Image (cartoon, rainbow, N blue to C red):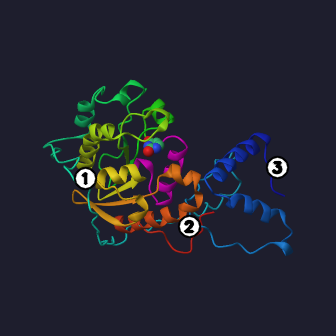
């Protein structure tokens, strides 16, 4: 007989399962149903969805025997990176947003942050609480660029820490990485009021700092999360669906645009597209998901 689950653990599990449900992971519910059914009526397990792996659920008591680890996607040590074909997009007419931004010799993230200072260069400063500069590994091979901070980020001064951020963390972990392995930042460093899109003058004022971050980190791959990041870096007016998942070039680096995690929260079926995009990134970085592994 399995040990009964305590009430507090039941509550914790229920909250965690609710969270997974919110982000489109419903595997647990199906498993619970399957476990409740008599053996003769159980349905065969459908193939595991190639979505984002769920983190291990905290257990209250250690089990008597070491439990089998949940089957997260297994990351092979390092495989030969794939060299992708790079397409080019026509840029918008007129002077490039970045024309005047030259590489600064001896630049660093610290210097960039110091130069940003307690910024009042655009109107976003008057409503922000904290500047959200960026977070992660200053030598990351992979940089994620979002649009701009939301309420949680504005309160904490860290990028992608709200609901969309939790999903981004799961995406990163499904790639076999951790948040501390990558660098995460935004086009604008201050929260636009009511989470509106940043305006052109705000993007123009703030994006040179983003550029310096990218130049200093010198990642192998930049992933733009959503249209604002993609349109800013690529200087294009095209809709993201026209180039999502394609390898593009940005200042000599590989860039791939995919959907924003906030969009995935509203539209969970698009997760499979994003997962395909992230697998392309994994191939370039020499990370591999072993085929046939479950993500339940
Ligand atoms: N959305 C973004 O684009 N950036 C964040 O940091 C959080 C939510």
Q: Is residue 257 above or below residue 208?
A: below
| Residue bearing the label numbered 1 | 218
Q: Is mark 2 within 8 Å of ligand 1?
A: no
Label 1–label 3 contact, CB within 8 A: no
Q: Position of residue 162 (x, y in %)?
A: 53, 40
Q: Is residue 9 left or right of residue 218?
A: right
* Front-lying residue, 226 or 160: 226
What's the residue at 28%, 34% (across, down)?
Answer: 113
- Residue furthest front in the image: 93
**How many angstroms separate mark 1 from mark 3 (CA)?**
52 Å
Quadrant, the C terminus: bottom right
What's the residue at 27%, 66% (across, down)?
Answer: 88
Q: Position of residue 101 (x, y in %)?
A: 18, 44
What's the residue at 29%, 55% (across, down)?
Answer: 234
| Residue bearing the label numbered 2 | 50
**How many angstroms separate mark 2 from mark 1 (CA)?**
30 Å
Q: Is residue 281 shown to the viewer in this render?
A: yes
Label 2–label 1 contact, CB within 8 A: no
Asked whether residue 30 is drawn in magenta, I would say no
Front of the two marks 3 and 2 = 2
Q: Position of residue 109 (x, y in %)?
A: 26, 40
Give the magenta range: 161-181
**How many angstroms separate mark 3 from mark 2 (CA)?**
32 Å
Q: Quadrant of ligand 1?
A: top left
* Secondary structure of the residue carrying numbered label 1: loop
| Residue bearing the label numbered 3 | 4
């Amino acid at each position: 007989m399995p040990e009964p689950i305590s009430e507090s653990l039941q509550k914790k599990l229920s909250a965690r399962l609710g969270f997974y449900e919110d982000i489109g992971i419903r595997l647990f519910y199906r498993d619970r149903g399957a476990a409740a059914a008599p053996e003769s009526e159980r349905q065969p397990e459908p193939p595991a969805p190639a979505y984002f792996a769920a983190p291990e659920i905290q257990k209250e008591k250690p089990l008597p025997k070491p439990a089998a680890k949940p089957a997260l996607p297994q990351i092979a040590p390092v495989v030969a990176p794939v060299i992708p074909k790079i397409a080019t997009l026509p840029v918008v007419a007129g002077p490039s947003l970045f024309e005047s931004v030259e590489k600064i010799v001896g630049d660093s993230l610290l210097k960039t942050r110091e130069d940003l200072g307690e910024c009042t260069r655009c109107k976003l400063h008057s409503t922000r609480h904290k500047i959200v500069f960026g977070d992660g590994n200053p030598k990351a091979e992979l940089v994620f660029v979002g649009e701009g901070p939301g309420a949680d980020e504005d309160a904490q001064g860290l990028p992608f820490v709200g609901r969309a951020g939790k999903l981004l963390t799961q995406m990163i972990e499904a790639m076999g990485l951790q948040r501390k392995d990558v660098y995460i930042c935004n086009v604008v460093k201050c929260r636009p009021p009511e989470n509106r899109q940043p305006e052109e003058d705000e993007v123009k004022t703030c994006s040179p700092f983003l550029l310096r971050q990218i130049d200093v980190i010198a990642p192998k791959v930049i992933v733009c999360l959503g249209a604002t990041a993609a349109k800013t870096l690529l200087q294009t007016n095209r809709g993201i669906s026209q180039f999502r998942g394609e390898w593009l070039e940005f200042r000599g680096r590989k860039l791939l645009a995919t959907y924003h995690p906030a969009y995935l929260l509203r539209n969970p079926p698009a997760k499979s597209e994003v997962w395909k995009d992230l697998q392309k990134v994994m191939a370039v970085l020499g990370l591999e998901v072993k085929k046939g592994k479950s993500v339940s």
